[in-house]
Amino acid sequence: MTIQTGSLQAGSLKTALFASAAILMATAAAAQAADIPIGHLADQSGGTSDVGVPYAQGVSDALAYINAHGGINGTKMAVDSVDYGYQAPRAISQYKKWSSGSDKIVALQGWGTADTEALTGFVSKDEIPAYSGSYSGHLTDPTGKGPHGSKPAPYNFFYGPSYSDALRGMLTWAAEDWKKKGGQGKPKYVHMGANHPFPNAPKEAGEQIAKELGFEVLPPVQFALTPGDYSAQCLTLKEAGANYAYLGNTAGSGISVLKACQTVGAKVQFMGNVWGMDENAAKAAGSAADGVVFPMRTAVTWTGDAPGMKLMKDISKISDPSGNAYRPVHYMAGVCTAYYMKEALEWAGKNGGLSGPNIRKAMYQKKDWVPAGLEGVCIPSTWTETDHRGMTAVNIYRASVKGDTEASVDELVKSGAIKLEKVATEDVPRKPEWLGW
Amino acid sequence: MANVSIIPSGDFKTSYAADTTIFPTKTSRNFAILGVVLLLACPAFLDRYWLSLLIQIGYLGIAALGLNILVGFTGQISIGHSAFFGFGAFASAWLNNSLGVPVALAIPLAGVVTTGVGLIFGVPAARLKGLYLAIATLAAQYILQDFFGRADWFTGGSAGTIAEPLTIFGFAFDTDERYFYVVLVAMVVMYILGTNLMRTRDGRALVAVRDHYLSAEIMGINLTKYRTMSFGISAFYAGIGGALYAHYLQFVSVENFTILFSIQFLGMIIIGGLGSIMGTLMGTAFMVLLPEVMQAATKLVSGTAVDTALNLRENIAFLREMSIGLVIILFLVFEPDGLAHRWKQIKAYWKLYPFSH
C-alpha cells in the first residue's frame, strides 16, 4: 500500500520537475537579445540596501531612458540587473556567469567595496570596465604604483570623491570647525563602522591625516551594518570625550547610532560618508540627524535648480510616471554614474569598437567632464591613465532637521523641515602618496 | 529507517564479503558507472549555467557527506559545519598564496588541516550529547567565524582573499568546463571512500555508537575515540569541499560561512536521508536546484497580474526565500525519511510492477 502512494507522489514529483525545467528554458529564451550586454549588480536586500535601492533605481532608470532615446549610437543595451544581497561571493559567481560565454558583458555597473575590490583582478584580466558604487581609495590606482601597496585597478571607475579623500576633506573642515568654535586643546577623533571592507577602506588614511591635523585619535568603535541598539558604542564615545566621529556604514545603521547617541547624550559632531546620510535617513533619524555633515556627490539636491535637472526629472519618470517622487541624493549619483558609462561607450563605439581597452581609453578623453544634459548636476570629473581619482573636491553638506518628521520626505523638504545645506568645499590635494589609499 | 530494498529470488550471498559490496547488485553498480560516464560527457552539451550548478552540487555534496557521517551514521549533531567548510577554503588559499604549495596539493592538505581543527572541536563531543553538543558545535561556528574575520594573515580579514585557479602542468582548470572534471573526480573518490568506510570495522563502530552507545561500549568500542574520530572525518570532508569551492570561485570571504549555511548543510542531509550516502547527494542536488527553480518561478510571476494585484514589486525576491522555507517544511512533513527512502520505494514499485501487493 505504501508503495502505491509512493508511485503517486513520484508521479507528481516528476510533473513538478518537468514543469520547472520548462520554466527554466522559457526564461533562458526570453533573455536572449543581440544588444550590448551590461551587468548590473545591486544590493536590494542586503546590509546596504537602504542606499543600494535608490542608487540602483537611478542606474536602472538612466539606462532604460538611454535605451528609449536611441541607445548607444543606435544600439540598445541589454541590462541584466541582479540583487546580490551585499554578499561578495554571490557577486563573484554572478560576474563569472556574465564574463564567460558568447554574451560577455561589455561593462559592469557594480556596487559594494568587498565585491568590487575582490573583482578588481578579474575585471582587469577580462578587460571589463567596472563602474562601482564603492568609492574605496584602493580602486583609484590604475597602475598599482601607489606607495601604500595598492593593487593595480586599471578597469575600476567610480563617480565621486574616494572614501579616503572625502574623509580627508571632512577632517580638514573639522579642524577649522574646532578652532572656529573656540575648542580648547586637541580635538578627539574616532572612526566608527563595521569590520567590513567598506567602512575599513578609509580608516588608516583618515587616522593618519587626523594626527597630522592635530587630532587625538581614539581607538575605533565598531557597529554592525544593520540597525540595532548601539547605546554601548555611544557611551564609549561619551566616556572617551570624542568630538568628531566618522560614520563608516550606510545610513540605515547610522540612524541607530545617531538616535542612541542622542539618548545617552553624547555630544559628538558626526561625519557621515557619502552613503551615510540622505533625505530618507534625515526623516527617519529626526532631530538626531540635525547637524550631521556628509560629502555630497552632486551639485544640487532633487529640489535644486540646475539645467541638468530637466533630464534628471525625465529619467525619474521611467519608474515614476506621475513625476511626483522625491529622489534622494543616491538616485542622482546613480544617474550620473550611468551617464559617464554611456558617454564612454559612445566614444568607444565611434573609435574602434566596444572593447574594454577602448572604453577605458574613452574615460580619459575629457577633462572636467560633465555628461551632456546633466550640466549643473553631476560634478566635473577627470580620470587619467595613471590616476582614477575622478573628483577630489569634497562638497560638505549639513543635514538640518527641524521639528516633527512625520510627513513624507517630499513634503518635509518642501516645508523646509529637512534641509541639506552646503557648509564648505574642501579641495583635497591630489598627492601622489595618497594614490590607491 | 525502513529498508525496502528488494533482491531477486535466487540471488544468494554465500560470504560476508559478498554481502558487503559497495553496490548491492550488479545492476546498481553498472548504473553508477553509467552515471559517471554520462557526467563525463556533460561539459560537451550543457551550458555554463547547468555546469556551475553541477559543480556546486559536487563540492557541497562532498561536505554534506562529511556531515552525514557525523549526524546520520554516528548520531552526533553539528551546527558548525560551514565553519569547517570555510576553514578548508581559507586553508587551501593560504597554503597556496603564502607558502607556495601547488593548488593540486593544497586541496588535500587543506582537508588534513581542517581534520585537525575538527578533532580539536570534536573533543567536547566525547563527553556531550544531544542539545549540549549542539551548543558546543555552535561555539565552534562562532569562534571560527570570528577568527576568519580577524586573522588578516590567514584569511585577508574582512576583505577576503583571492584563491588561484587549479593548475596542473601548466593546464589551468579555470573555466567551468574544466573545473567540472576536477570536482567530479574528487566527488567520485570521496563518495567511494565514504561508502567504503561504512564497510570497515570503524564504520560499523560508528553506526553502533549511533544505534546504542551503551551496547557499543559493552562490545568494546571506544566511544571517545569514535565520537572524536567522526568529527575529524566530518571536518576532513568539509575541508575538501571548502577547498574545492575556494579554487572554483577563486575568492574566499568570511561572510559566506554563517550559521545559516550550516543549517543548509543539515537541510541537505535531512532532505536526502540521514545515514544514506546516496541520499546525501540527492539532498544536496535538491537544495542547490530549489532556489534556481524558485528564482525562475518568481521571474515568471514578476510583471504579471498576480504581481500587480498583490503589489509585490521588489518584494518578489523575498518570495523566493520564503518559498524555499515552505518547501523544506512540506518536505519534512510528507517525506520525513528523505529522498533516499523515496527512491527505494520507487525502485521497489517498478520491480514489482504491476503486482505490487
Image (spheres, rainbow, N blue to C red):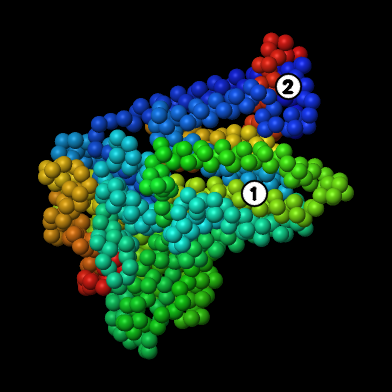
Quadrant hosting residue A328 = bottom left
Q: Image check: A12 left or right of A194? A: right
Find numbered disc 2 in the image and state the secondary structure of the residue it sits on: loop
Query: Which comes before the other along the chain, label 2 or label 1?
Result: 2
Q: Residue at x 31, y 54 (%)?
A: A132
Q: Residue at x 64, y 22 (%)?
A: B27
Give the mark count.
Answer: 2
Contact check, label 2 and label 1, Cβ < 8 Å? no
Q: Which residue is mark 1?
A: B234
Q: CA distance from mark 2 to mark 1?
A: 31 Å
- Residue A199 lies, with reference to residue B14, above or below; the image says below
- Residue A436 lies, with reference to residue A326, above or below; the image says below
**Label 1 is placed on what type of residue?**
Ser
Q: Chain of mark 1?
A: B
- The x, y position of residue A284, in whole percent, is 43, 59
Find numbered disc 1 in the image and state the secondary structure of the residue it sits on: helix
- The x, y position of residue A322, in whole percent, is 29, 41
Q: Which mark is residue B6?
A: 2
